[in-house]
Amino acid sequence: MIIRSPFLRTVRLGISSLLLHKLRAFLTTLGVLFGVASVIAMLAVGEGASESAQEQIRQLGSQNVILRSVKPPEDQQSNQDVRVLAYGLTDSDRLRIENTYPGVRSVIPVMQVPEEVRKGTRVCRPRVLCTRSDYREATGRVIYEGRFLSELDESLEEPACVLSYEVARHLFPFSSPVGESIRIGGEYLEVVGVVLPRGPVGQVSIDSSTEVGGDLFLPLSAGRRMFGTTQVKMRSGSRDITEVELHEIIVDVRKAADVPMIADACRAMLIREHNDKDWEVIVPLELLLRAEETKRIFNIVLGSIAGISLLVGGIGIMNVMLATVTERTREIGIRRALGAKRKDIVIQFLVETTVLSGCGGLAGVALGLIIPAIVEATADMPTIVTPQAPALAFGISVGIGVVFGLYPAWRAANMDPVEALRHE
Amino acid sequence: MTPQTQTEVAAELVNVRRVYQMGSTEVAALDGITHQFGRGEYWSIMGSSGSGKSTLLNILGCIDRPTEGEYLVGGSPVSTLDDDQLSELRGARLGFVFQSYNLIPQLDVLENILVPVMYRDEWPAWALDRAKDLAERVGLGGRTGHRPPELSGGQQQRVAIARALINDPDLILADEATGNLDSKTAEEILEVFDELHAEGKTILLVTHERSIGLRAELTMKLVDGRIDEVVENRSS
Ligand SMILES: Nc1ncnc2c1ncn2[C@@H]1O[C@H](COP(=O)(O)OP(=O)(O)O)[C@@H](O)[C@H]1O
Ligand SMILES: [Mg+2]
């Protein structure tokens, strides 16, 4: 078959020349194939990992500044049997923030109660959070059934509570908990609603373990009335009594742009008002930015590793092409004698390396799309293949064919025709 | 020494030397060759092994350049041409037939015949028909789809001749073209050359075999890179 387009003719010639050594061509292609596949797979895994990290941070609310009580480092001399340790955030901290910064939408107090939750014989240990009605809005929790806490619950000190989905399923495996009552410590509370968990619903287990995670919300006023602000914990014969007014203060900021400024102001206020470093300030937005930076570094590292494997593939191509050029010295001499210019010889060999690397690239893209799918299915890790990744990897593979083909092609083109024709 | 002909000059050598540097010593493979090959002439270039026949043919074929002196094809001096122009000249005006056929193994008969056309700037409309005609003419009309390894030596050399003719060259250069063939096949190839000569082609045939050399119209004898004698053969 005679093809008139000079370029297509050269491509066809390149393919038929490569097919003279099928195994060699195949093995050479493998180098590029794995290089390209690893580029795509690594980017997909990296993208997936950082995306899920970012999602977790986003769930904290990127418009929030979270203040947390932290137990200060223990003193060595306090070796009594009974210790009372008072530390952490206070209502006055909350009020100060609320009254000082106009950019703040709400300042939500959270107190945590270290109590078990029971329904009949079923027990679990969720985070028992005493808070206000605006908690849900600030943290973006979604109502599954019933309602969240209301302002009325707060002012009437209602013994109402809201369960997160995993807690609800654990305590009420077969029915709706709304309207039912549960017991926390010695107190009975009525379930008024259920909110969705933060993780995927499918992961909820209905076994008898108490470690189901999840949350339980009740009005702060009711929580204070029932459980007070002191928490007693028995520990190896001694009693630990801690007194924490608020475990967490969530500052819901109106504009994301104000978040860093308000975070800094909160830090300054806490440094001023607290003698001990019994607090920490968590800024999801900052975490998000840091996660993005981490992702960038991650991508550079993965990219370098993948780049090295592509480089190895390219060197493989160069190696094989140098051998091919030597082997086909005579053919080069013939073509030169029959009118081929140096340029024609260069193009001929470049087309061959490009066909090699291009085929490797295509197969690599296919494999690179399969690997993340397998990783996702078997290792339960999220992966994301961005559309740029295969295009980028394929482009690089073709580029590598050209770059690593140039020297062998140049060698071929600069052979002396007489010498080449004499070559056996 | 040069025979006086009324014909146009196809190729002219003026005091051509080709010196190989072998370490510190110089070997003059050609040592002052001055000669004119007329258009339409059929020459045999003879001499013992190492006398410089191939070196001369390489210079005539523009794949090698003289160390000294000048070579002119169709009146234009080769020394003024760059590598690309030389390539173009080889493709368009010269036709090579080699001792070991030198076909390209991954191409079939028709593609091999068309190789010199592939390196022209444009693909001429006549190329395919002409290639088929030439294949027919050298007796391979039914085998245009075969690849060289599937052909006998004689058949491969016929393909090579067809390939040399595809661009209708001014000069056909053959270096020991029958050297790898048995005498019967060689005879068939030589008959093709006779026919080409009859059609008016200029042919330069290198051989060390006297019987073959005598078939040409004219014979140049080389000894140690010099022209020893030029004889006009009695045509039978
Ligand atoms: N590339 C080369 N390097 C060195 N000497 C060479 C080279 N090519 C040919 N020669 C020398 O030039 C002379 C003529 O060689 P050549 O033209 O091949 O002879 P012929 O074809 O008549 O047998 C020989 O002595 C050979 O050794
Ligand atoms: Mg020779």
Image (cartoon, coloured by chain):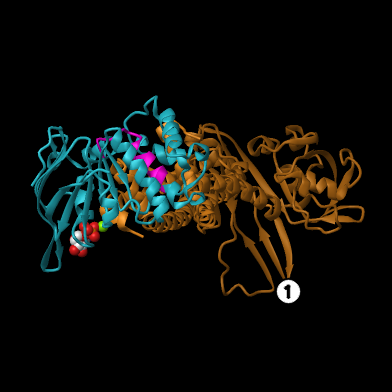
Chain colours: A orange, B cyan
Taking depth in this image into account, of A316 and A20 the one nearest to the observer is A20
Mark 1 lies on a secondary structure that is loop
Which segment did they paint magenta? B157-171
Q: Position of residue B71 (x, y in %)?
A: 13, 43
Classify mark 1 as within 8 Å of ligand 1 or not, answering yes or no: no
Residue at 65%, 52% in the rendered image? A375
Q: Position of residue A301 (x, y in %)?
A: 46, 55
Taking depth in this image into account, of B51 and A352 the one nearest to the observer is B51
The crowding category of the residue bearing disc 1, from other C-alpha atoms within 10 Å (few below 14, some 14 to 19, many at least 20), is few
Q: Main secondary structure of the magenta part?
A: helix
Q: Position of residue A343 (x, y in %)?
A: 30, 41
| Residue type beneath disc 1 | Ser
Residue lying furthest front: B236
Report ligand 1 position as a quadrant. Answer: bottom left
Taking depth in this image into account, of A223 and B188 the one nearest to the observer is B188
B100 relative position to B67: left or right: right
Can residue A344 be seen at all in this image of the molecule? no
Q: Position of residue B221 (x, y in %)?
A: 17, 54
Residue at 16%, 56% in the rendered image? B222
Residue at 11%, 45% in the rendered image? B35
Where's the C terminus of chain A, which quadrant?
bottom left
Position of A176 relative to B150 (above/below)? above
Q: Dividing the picture into quarters, in which one does residue A351 lie?
A: top left
List the residue tagged with mark 1: A236
Can residue A158 be seen at all in this image of the molecule? yes
Q: Dividing the picture into quarters, in which one does residue B23 lie?
A: bottom left
Position of A326 relative to B36 (above/below)? below
